Image (spheres, coloured by chain):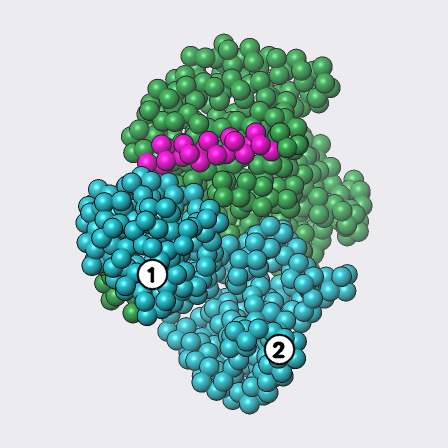
Chain colours: A green, B cyan
Amino acid sequence: MNEIFDGVRALCVAAREAAPSVALADHATRNRALCAMADALERASAAILDANARDLENAAANGVPAVMHDRLRLTDARIADIAAAMRALVQLPDPTDRREVWQRPSGITITRQQVPLGVVAIIYEARPNVTADAAALCIKSGNAVILRGGKEAIETNRAIVGVMQGALAACGIDPRVIGLVTATARESATALMQMRGLVDALIPRGGKGLIQNCVENAKVPVIETGAGNCHVYVDAAADLEKALAVTVNAKCQRPSVCNAAETLLVHRAVAADFLPRLYDATREWELEFRGCPATCAILPEAIPATEDDYATEYNDYILTVKVVDGVDEAIAHINRYGTRHSEAILTEDAAAATAFQARVDAAAVYHNASTRFTDGGEFGFGAEIGISTQKLHARGPMGLDALTTVKYLVTGDGTVRK
Amino acid sequence: MNEIFDGVRALCVAAREAAPSVALADHATRNRALCAMADALERASAAILDANARDLENAAANGVPAVMHDRLRLTDARIADIAAAMRALVQLPDPTDRREVWQRPSGITITRQQVPLGVVAIIYEARPNVTADAAALCIKSGNAVILRGGKEAIETNRAIVGVMQGALAACGIDPRVIGLVTATARESATALMQMRGLVDALIPRGGKGLIQNCVENAKVPVIETGAGNCHVYVDAAADLEKALAVTVNAKCQRPSVCNAAETLLVHRAVAADFLPRLYDATREWELEFRGCPATCAILPEAIPATEDDYATEYNDYILTVKVVDGVDEAIAHINRYGTRHSEAILTEDAAAATAFQARVDAAAVYHNASTRFTDGGEFGFGAEIGISTQKLHARGPMGLDALTTVKYLVTGDGTVRK
């Protein structure tokens, strides 16, 4: 444990020392570094795929579930996608190019300048694309980054990080601004969470367990991301055609992601009309319905929902359905069971929509649109480091701005406080 | 412990339930509530002073240090000051009156709306003025607040909170939006730090021990405040008259506060000239000097500084002095020992100033001005809930804005993601 802790600490100290070489690099240099990283990854694709093949062999030998193999697997096409995403970042504006200046009667001039956070830590699972994406977002925004990915991807991550470090060095940026935690024991993640004074922000990316672990154990500032127990509420005044399209999209388009819907709340006045239509419309995915007693009375195919169902993010083709008496009950249910991610109302009643949007406590609250839009790209941010479900610092999709903070530069002429 | 935990939890649940009554109240109503609170506190001053007298008696009986008695003591004048500060808040703009609207090619319209955080928890020491100030800042910004003050002030806090709750109720706001933790055992603070899902942000206000405790043990999001091991660096190119004025102001004007300087770094080229002048200028406060060997050689009155001295926030008439070889050494020293609060360079060399302001990692970095300016009032924010020394969410003096977050309101017309 101590050896792992010391190793992680040394990595963070090195990143902190190196951080000014990216924080103080101008935007053109950081963009050149991104291009160099993209080029280098494509040039090194054979070596990266070799490393990836070793990870995949180990995964097979260690009985890692097949669904994880796909996340772990890289191909030439996926490496090209990673490189393309890096090159796309170049086109985005510099997130640190923002300042406000004002003078005070005391004689001081204050500049509020956007600056990089400093050292950002990312703890994630066995998705090697995150290694490259997160590093690129950090370099673009002038941050050093410590990466701690899932152990299943360690060989691939070593290869990717080595290539990116080489590209940085060639651009005059200290390669230690990208650090990879190579100790794969659980203790290395725990150690990273303790690096107060060295890590300015920790962003966990992954499943509920990983995020809970970070939020509960970190002593460094954390941005909680991801968990999405999202709801669609179909009001009495809903246009049922729109409601059908949005509910199907929110639930079935990509159920494995955090902005997919898990529970449908439907007004008693329209439930008997809406639910059978929804059932029919979702046969191609064989969507499973779990319902309250009123739902089960309307839809004999539904199985009874438990209290647990209301609190569960299935990430699967399962939908919990509850019949409610109106927008108040819908809001109360969502504020009780929701994870404050994305919530939707379907209604043609403007007052109901306004009440829902004002009173539901979530990062994104939709009126007549699908929860699936909660995404940095769909919001127009050009990039996304995660989706915050907390309220401090950033909420909802986080773009490059979320990787910056402010610094006050104050100038006087021997000015003292009275 | 369980009883205390359950009590704190019940208070937080009540605040969460009541929160919409202040979050959705319009600005005029929130301002009326502030006026009503101010009026009520002044009207109830006799009862509040009675409660305060009981706290002071208990403090004397329990051997609480005399310096704490002054912080604990209220007078008619202090109550009038508290009321005046509340009325001054009324004049400030509504921090939730800010939104940005844009449309996306997908057909959705996105409104990024500033909203209250929700439920804010404040853990602080035996300063009853914080009870009223923090509650007022939260009401102004539309937040519910849970207050957990030092046990020495419990009677005063009960009286103040009771009066404020009565004023809120008279204005149609649910009085449970101000909650007071009345269990004074240490476990009640620990319990409050665990209220995930109920507390949106925890702001500790007080000494280093209190803040460390919150940062290390909280499972809710925390804004770290306060600790200030601040430095003044007098460069070779300094105007020594300005340097003298700023150093004396930064160290001696009010040494007990977090933005006071603790260490002077002085360039070797001017140390022999500057240090004796500084020594003479600080005799009225009998400032104690603790120095590096070079300092002690110049100033025989200085006692040798230890490694600990460099890391200590004295909050007292003590100054550590180190002679350095230039701006690089000064920056390295500050980034090693500083708490990222407020740092100053005195120089007429613009390049040195620019390097110092860019490379010193702190919330506020001064050129030819005193560190004492790091303050919400001095920065022009009109109010201050604390000074953040972290980088997430808020950095430096936090005004009403720091008590808000954003919410995305998204509208479509049955719009689905492709």
Q: Is residue A210 magenta?
A: no
Q: What x and y, as percent, mark residue A72?
A: 60, 21
> Which contiguous range is marked in magenta?
A5-24
Q: Chain of mark 1?
A: B
SS at badge 1:
helix
What mark, if any, has residue B59 been given in the picture? Answer: 2
As drawn, is A281 to the left or to the right of A380?
right
What mark, if any, has residue B250 been given in the picture? Answer: 1
Residue B185 vertical placement versus A390 (above, below)? below
| Numbered circles on residues, count | 2
Q: What x and y, as percent, mark residue A371?
A: 56, 43
Q: Chain of mark 2?
A: B
- Work out how far the residue at label 1 is from the one at label 2, CA to CA, in angstroms: 33 Å
Residue A287 vertical placement versus B356 (above, below)? above
Residue A66 vertical placement versus B48 (above, below)? above
As drawn, is B125 to the left or to the right of A319?
left
Q: Is the C-beta separation of discs 1 and 2 under 8 Å?
A: no
SS at badge 2:
helix
Q: Which residue is pictured at 32% across the width and 67% down the height? A: B283
Task: Tell which of A106 and B166 is nearer to you.
Answer: A106
Asked whether residue A366 is in view, the answer is no
Quarter of the image for residue A372 reads top right
Q: What x and y, as percent, mark residue B26?
A: 47, 70
Amino acid type indicated by mark 1: Ala
Q: Which residue is pictured at 67% across the width and 63% down the height? A: B186
Q: What x and y, as percent, mark residue B159?
A: 60, 81
Amino acid type indicated by mark 2: Ala
Marks 1 and 2 belong to one chain: yes
Quarter of the rendering occupied by the N terminus of chain B: bottom right
Magenta stretch: helix, strand or loop mostly: helix
Task: Tell which of A269 and A2 is nearer to you.
Answer: A2
